[in-house]
Amino acid sequence: MVFHCELTIPDSTLKTSPATTEIVLSEGMIDTVTMLFPAGCAGLAYVQVWLGGYQLVPWSRGSWVHGDDHLIAHQVNHAVGPAPRLLRVLGYNEDDTNSHTIAVSIDVTPFYPTAVSSIPAELLDQLGLG
């Protein structure tokens, strides 16, 4: 499953009071977090991605990702259990004139098949579910 959100960071947004957006994920494994910094950001818009109290992107706690006309993908490989499933995207902006919108996509592989029809018939029979 792919989850998507956008974070609009107003001009002059401080690191100490970042803009925030949230998205609820399904249970599974977060494979990749991808961020699109459009042309014009000039490296002045900064983003972090958190799950609960854990900073997922960038890996180094307290650091931020930034770019200009860049698509940046991070391999995460982090499990999302029943809770917390609230993913937060935080951003600040050193540009004193323009706001910037960063697109974020999160690829999550479900832990379990989403339909019984995807389970081989032989296995269903062995489990007494066929």
Image (spheres, rainbow, N blue to C red):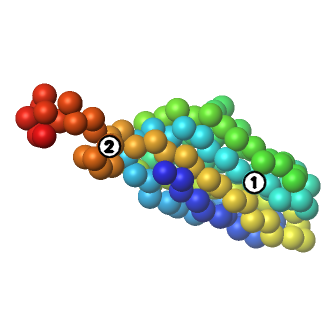
The answer to whether the residue labelled 2 contacts the one labelled 1, judged by CB atoms less than 8 Å apart, is no
Q: Nearer the viewer, residue 10 or 128?
A: 128
- Residue 56 lies in what quarter of the image? top right
Q: Secondary structure at mark 1?
A: strand
Closer-to-camera residue (66/126): 126
Q: Residue furthest left?
A: 128
Q: Where is mark 1, residue-wise?
A: 36
Residue plotted at (91% across, 61% down): 40
Q: Residues within 10 Å of mark 1 (few under 14, many from 20)?
A: some
- Label 2 or label 1, whichever comes before in sequence order: 1
Q: Position of residue 27 (x, y in %)?
A: 37, 46
Whether residue 94 is visible here, answered yes or no, is no
- Please name the residue shown 58% across and 59% down the image: 4
Tell me the quadrant of the picture where the C terminus can be found. top left
Q: Kindly identify the amino acid type of the residue bearing the numbered disc 2.
A: Ser
Viewer-nearest of labels 2 and 1?
2
Q: Position of residue 126 (x, y in %)?
A: 13, 28
Residue 103 visible, this orientation: yes
- Label 2 – label 1 distance at C-alpha: 34 Å
Question: Crowding at label 2, few (<14), some or many (≥20) Cα neighbours within 10 Å?
Answer: few
Within the image, what quadrant is residue 31 found in? top right
The residue drawn where x is 11% and y is 40% is 129
- In the drawing, does residue 105 fall left or right of residue 24? right
Residue position marked by numbered label 2 in the rendering: 118
Q: Which mark is residue 26?
A: none
Residue closest to the eye, 62 or 52: 52
Give the tally of numbered discs: 2
Mark 1 is on which residue type?
A: Leu
Q: Quadrant of residue 60?
A: top right
